[in-house]
Image: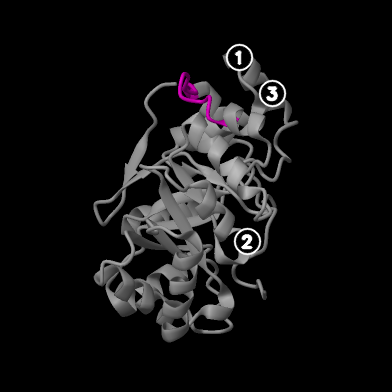
Amino acid sequence: MSQQPTVTLNDGAVMPQFGLGVWQTPDDEAPEIVQAAVAAGYRLVDTAAIYGNEGGVGRGLKGAEGVFLTTKLWNDCQGFDNALKAFDKSEKRLGRRIDLYLIHWPRPDLDRYVDAWRALVRLKQDGRVGSIGVSNFMPDHLERIIGETGVAPAVNQIELHPRFQQHRLVEAHRKHGVVTESWSPLGRGSLLDDPAIGRIAQKHGKTPAQTIIRWHLDNGYVVIPKSANPARVRQNIEVFDFRLDDEDLKIMAALDRKDGRTGPDPMTARF
């Protein structure tokens, strides 16, 4: 396996560009999957309080060194004091230092995400967390928290894949030095049968999933494909021995669709 790429965050921390997502992985299955990922060379694991598997992830990482760990604040814990308490609980369940803590959704209807961000800034200032960021924030949400606190998120984790490329939001990230991290990077599997991707995959002797993961890496995004299958987990990391060429990237760019979103809209999500 070739040397894995990293990105340097706006606070100076170094984050692996490739990792494991554990959404929908049951807590009792998480240790095995996480251990398989670490054994395969993964150095980034992404979980969240709402996933209900922080304990399992922590058990899977026991004794593992050099793994960058991300978790997230759930919506009902927004607000300053609530966010601090939620962080304590996540830290206890995980049993280790959190490298990156994110606000999971903005929930603008609640109007508590700015106070939640202030809490994350406090955690960072107190040295309790390595880096802080957000997830599913749109440009207006980013502008507001930066404007009211003077602190830009290190990362914004968003739905992003070849069929939903979010150019306006990615440009807002570049403006503020925010790293783009892709969730649902394979479009919840909907892209695996795309003929254009299939042709590119065949050209490089790779699977469609590996080809899409490589697209994220070549665009500079952090990517966290989810799998509960140890064999697939090992296959997903076999992406460091090739790159997409300009023609491949041009073909992939043309797959973008205005209606390509597969998950909730951050502006209207109510959960």
- Helix, strand, or loop for circle 2? helix
Residue 225 visible to an observer of this rendering: no
Horizontally, residue 188 falls left or right of residue 4, namely: right
Which residue is depicted at the point 40% across and 59% down? 98
Q: Amino acid at mark 1?
A: Gly
Q: Is residue 95 above or below residue 219?
A: below
Any mark on residue 205, and which?
A: 1
What segment is highlighted magenta in the picture? 236-246
Horizontally, residue 100 falls left or right of residue 33, namely: left
The residue carrying pointer 2 sits among few (fewer than 14), some (14 to 19) or many (20 or more) residues within 10 Å by Cα, namely some
Q: Magenta: predominant secondary structure element?
A: loop
Quarter of the image where one finds residue 227: top right
Q: CA distance from mark 3 to mark 1?
A: 10 Å
Q: Is residue 201 magenta?
A: no
Residue 115 visible to an observer of this rendering: yes
Quarter of the image where one finds residue 80: bottom left
Any mark on residue 186, and which?
A: none
Q: Amino acid at mark 3?
A: Gly
Residue wearing tag 3: 198
**Quadrant placement of the N terminus:** top left
Q: Amino acid at mark 2?
A: Tyr
Q: Which badge, 2 or 3, is on the more N-terminal residue?
A: 2
Residue wearing tag 2: 51
Tell me residue 266's x, y (percent): 59, 67
Tell me residue 223's x, y (percent): 50, 42
Mark nearest the camera among 2 and 1 is: 2
Q: Is residue 23 above or below residue 80?
A: above
Query: In the depicted view, which residue is nearer to us: 7 or 96?
Result: 96
